[in-house]
Amino acid sequence: MKTKSLDDLFLDMLKDIYYAERKILKALPKMARGAQSSELQAAFEKHRDETEIQIERLQQVFELIGKPARGKTCPAIDGIIEEGEEVLESFAGSEAIDAGLIATAQAVEHYEMARYGTMCRWADLIGQKQAAKLLKETLAEEEATDGNLTKIAEGSANQAALKAA
């Protein structure tokens, strides 16, 4: 049996995040439709557009390492997306919906930031400098999205949810 290396681990995580990004791309329009505030709807729509570009970047990374772009089931992202669907069902029409959607979206962002941060470092270590550069671009976008979601939560969504109580 071949000993697994950091290259193998990098590929495994690349497949994981590729699957996750594609699932997120499908979930974002539902989240945008479910959001009450136009600011949150716009944030989800903007991130959907970014996610399309992020998927293209991941495809470039696969190409750089000479592997086909294929995902591998990611139970973590499946679970977070399922939680988001529960929020959409349980809180539809409620003033609390936006706060719930933001919480779910931030769980997604934090998962992505953890994955991209690790992959950036690993890409550097295995000598994939161009891959690291592409992954760092995506990491910066994920961090910006998380910051924007925090701004929306603290600016209006959490207070709206509190007043509804």
Image: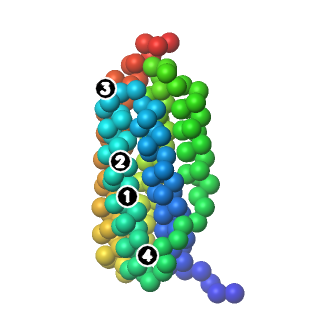
Q: Is residue 54 visible?
A: yes
Residue of label 1: 52
- Amino acid on which the number 2 mark rests in the picture: His
Q: Mark 3 vs mark 4: which is more N-terminal?
A: 4
| Type of amino acid under label 1 | Glu
The residue tagged with tag 3: helix, strand or loop?
Answer: helix
User: Residue 92 at what x, y percent from top left?
Assistant: 52, 25
Q: Quadrant of residue 72?
A: bottom right
Q: Identify the residue at horizontal 49%, vertical 43% (top origin).
A: 107
Instruction: Tell me whether the residue at label 4 lies in contact with that at label 1, contact meaning CB atoms closer than 8 angstroms.
Output: no
In the picture, measured across the screen, residue 76 lies left or right of residue 33, that is right
Question: In this rendering, would 59 be left or right of 72?
Answer: left
Numbered mark located on residue 47 in the image: 2
Asked whether the beta carbons under mark 4 and mark 2 sit within 8 Å of each other, the answer is no
Secondary structure, mark 4, is helix
Residue at screen point 42% across, 31% down: 35
Q: Which residue is mark 4?
A: 62
**Residue hosting label 3:** 155
